Image: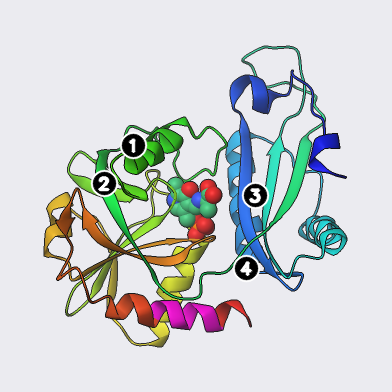
Amino acid sequence: MSLADAKISVLDRGFIFGEGLYEVMTAVECNLLHYKNHFKRLRDGAKDMQLEIPFSDSELYCLINEVLARNHFACCSVYLQFTKGPAPRNHFYPSEYVPTLFIMTSPFKMPSCLDVVNAILLKDIRWQKCNVKSTSLYANTWAKTMAKTSGGEEAIFEREGILTEGATSNLFLVYEDRVLTPKENEFILSGVTRELVLEILRRKNINYEETVIPTDSLWRADEVLLTSTTKGVVAVKAINGKPIGNGKNFNLGVEIFEAMKALSFT
Ligand code: PDD
């Protein structure tokens, strides 16, 4: 069905309460990448939200494949959203509901080389369930827009002097002898790309630590990298106008980018 023909009720809880879950995936030649990890995260979020997903993983996979097959994009992003559907407006979760499922594909160009961006540092004003990929994204859209207004691409969040993640990405700090990334907890989303990067670091025997990282560690890093499904890995040139490392060499960023490209197509 075309986007113009798709309709949902104005009483949908996603519309009324911003109560919903989503995933953004990519597909190459109808090959849905890393979908098991995306489905796992979706189910973890659904458990938290007490949202019954009325499909098995293989049924979900078939539904997405049907949308992919009808669109014939060589390379595309896949957006999937679940809500508890329409119900009379009431803050209590409805006891009975028919979930809304929305799947959309859009043509997408995989980045061909490592992108380098500017970022800003912002106070993490989000809630304490950032591990749930919820559609309530006002804090994220606000932060992204603040970054753009300052001539940047991404906002990096800090909470009480501790780095968490980007507004739409996970964070890696590269030092001479190791790589640091914020540990998984309720303050970050467990990124599918983050896990892929950790796998690449293991394969390359590069030391890494998932840990608590004070904000001032940024200024001593040789490289700061951001990861997400749609951007892959991106290097940060400067934060709040302050160059990262020497602002020119993103050696590990390039190495991870190349490894990721190879992995994504297998
Ligand atoms: N966002 N952290 C946040 C807050 C994110 O929104 C995202 C991705 C990530 C990276 O997760 P993954 O590697 O699984 O894409 C981390 C998607 C792409 C979005 O909202 O469009």
Q: Secondary structure at mark 1?
A: helix
Residue 263, placed above or below residue 182: below
The residue under label 1 is 146
- Neighbor class of circle 2 (other Cα within 10 Å; few <14, some 14-19, many 20+) is many
Separation of residues labelled 4 and 3 (CA atoms): 15 Å
The residue under label 3 is 43
Q: Quadrant of residue 201?
A: bottom left
Going 30% across and 83% down the picture, which residue do you hit?
A: 206
Please provide the residue range marked out in magenta.
256-262
- Quarter holding the C terminus is bottom right
Separation of residues labelled 1 and 3 (CA atoms): 32 Å
Q: Quadrant of residue 13?
A: top right
Badge 2 amino acid: Ile
Going 31% across and 79% down the picture, which residue do you hit?
A: 252
The residue under label 2 is 120
The residue under label 4 is 34
The reply to whether the C-beta atoms of the residues labelled 2 and 3 are less than 8 Å apart is no
- Neighbor class of circle 3 (other Cα within 10 Å; few <14, some 14-19, many 20+) is some
Q: Main secondary structure of the magenta part?
A: helix
Q: Secondary structure at mark 3?
A: helix
| Left or right: 40 as drawn, with respect to 65 | left
Separation of residues labelled 1 and 2 (CA atoms): 8 Å
Separation of residues labelled 2 and 4 (CA atoms): 30 Å
Separation of residues labelled 2 and 3 (CA atoms): 32 Å
The reply to whether the C-beta atoms of the residues labelled 1 and 3 are less than 8 Å apart is no
**Mark nearer the viewer, 4 or 3:** 4
Whether residue 190 is visible here, answered yes or no, is: no
Separation of residues labelled 4 and 1 (CA atoms): 31 Å
- Quarter holding the N terminus is top right
